[in-house]
Image (spheres, helix red, strand yellow):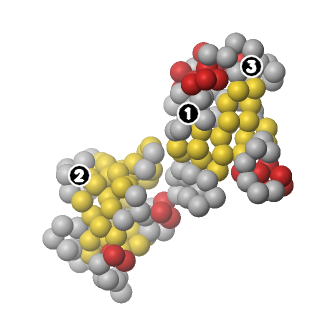
Amino acid sequence: VKIGKSGSSFTMKPNGGKGKSKKASNVMALKIDFIESKQESVLDDLNVEALMCEENISNTKEMVMECYLDPKTGDLIWGSGEVWFKKEWSVLVGAWADPENNLIEIRPDNALRYIDGYGPFNGEFIGFQKFHVKMPNGKYMVGNLMGIKEIKWNNGEKWTRCSDKGCSIM
């Protein structure tokens, strides 16, 4: 695992503690004992500590951290409760509507465009459920994915996924 914020990295092993079968759980859960694996130097990184369960931080005999993949959402859940998700643009792909009911298409190629022809604009994920889109003036608009049905932009505007409104993009 490499922590993007700080660059710290460490190796975790499959953990048989989650899931219905041992084989499935080896893919779905990971564990590390930093002391046993002689990787305790990364514990100086507060970003690593933030992923650990509170009771494991104060344990001096073993410094264990675990995470598992939620099979329903695909999110990676850490012992501290912090949630990571894949930065896949595909979660945004589809039809959206702005407050004036203008239709917007978010495409698989990391671009979005208004159906009336304005665009395309290129975007990318920059954090947990957070992405930005480069505008014609060179500045970025930042959007936050709120669940799977809403995008809230840094200018206060909200877009809703069209599947809930019955709209479609031809």
Q: Looking at the image, which residue is at 41% across and 62% down?
A: 148
Q: Amino acid at mark 1?
A: Ser
Q: Using the numbered discs, state the Cα–Cα distance from disc 3 to disc 2 in whole angstroms.
A: 53 Å
Q: Looking at the image, which residue is at 29% across and 67% down?
A: 160
Density class for disc 2 (Cα within 10 Å; few <14, some 14-19, many ≥20) is few
Q: Amino acid at mark 3?
A: Glu
Which residue sits furthest bottom?
Answer: 170
In contact (CB < 8 Å): disc 1 and disc 2: no
Q: Mark 3 or mark 1: name the one nearer the start of the chain.
A: 3
Image quadrant in which you'd find residue 114:
bottom left
The kind of secondary structure element at disc 3 is: loop
Density class for disc 3 (Cα within 10 Å; few <14, some 14-19, many ≥20) is some
Q: Which mark is residue 62?
A: 3
Image quadrant in which you'd find residue 35:
top right
Please indicate, yes or no, whether residue 52 appears anywhere in the rendered image: yes
The answer to whether residue 38 is left or right of residue 76 is right
The kind of secondary structure element at disc 1 is: loop
Q: Looking at the image, which residue is at 55% across and 33% down?
A: 80
Density class for disc 1 (Cα within 10 Å; few <14, some 14-19, many ≥20) is some
Q: Amino acid at mark 2?
A: Asn
Q: Which residue is mark 1?
A: 80
Q: Mark 3 or mark 2: name the one nearer the start of the chain.
A: 3
Q: Image quadrant for the C terminus?
A: bottom left
Name the residue nearer the viewer: 105 or 51: 51
Name the residue nearer the viewer: 137 or 1: 1
